[in-house]
Image (cartoon, grey):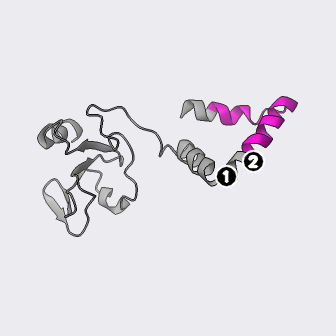
Amino acid sequence: MLASTRAQGVLLVPDPDVMALRELVTELIALPAANRYLAGLVSGLELRYELPGGHPLLGRALPDLDPTLLHAGRAVVLEAGERARYPGDQVPGYGWGDEALLVRPDGRVGWVDDGYEPLADALTRWT
């Protein structure tokens, strides 16, 4: 995030060489793939925290997560294709793919049921 902020600051420098770079970046932003990448970078959605286990969702913001599931500021367990539950409460009708996930209160995936770590250990660490 810091590198992104610094790069944006450089693009504002009133220098002819920087203006040429600014024009190039403007052209790149017009490309949908570059636009999505830069939007994710600037927003922090592409940020991935390194967590043990190696699953591609670990440490990432969960795409398409209903933000109301996190309104209580607690971790949420999304069971594979069934329902979501706060520890102790059930939220019917929400599931995620073929794996159970623990979503931290910040919307990042903190645990995936991939055999690396028991859910109880992940809940102890994140809640």
x%, y% of residue 23?
80, 42
Could you classify mark 2 by the number of other residues whose Cα lies within 10 Å: few (under 14), some (14-19), or many (20 or more)? Answer: few
Question: Where is residue 4, by image quadrant?
Answer: top right
> Circle 1 — which element?
loop
The segment highlighted magenta reads 6-27
Question: Disc 1 marks which residue?
Answer: 31
What residue type is disc 1 on?
Answer: Leu
Q: Residue 88's mark?
A: none
Question: Where is residue 85, by image quadrant?
Answer: bottom left
What residue type is disc 2 on?
Answer: Glu
Q: Is residue 75 visible?
A: no
By secondary structure, the bulk of the magenta-drawn segment is best described as helix
The one of 15 and 58 positioned closer to us in this rendering: 58
Q: Left or right? Give the position of 23 relative to 127.
A: right
Question: Disc 2 marks which residue?
Answer: 27
x%, y% of residue 20?
83, 36
Q: Distance between the residues labelled 1 and 2?
A: 7 Å
Q: Do the residues labelled 1 and 2 touch (CB within 8 Å)?
A: yes
Residue placed at 23% from the left, 39% from the top? 126
Q: Left or right? Give the position of 28 relative to 50.
A: right
> Circle 2 — which element?
helix
Q: Is residue 50 magenta?
A: no
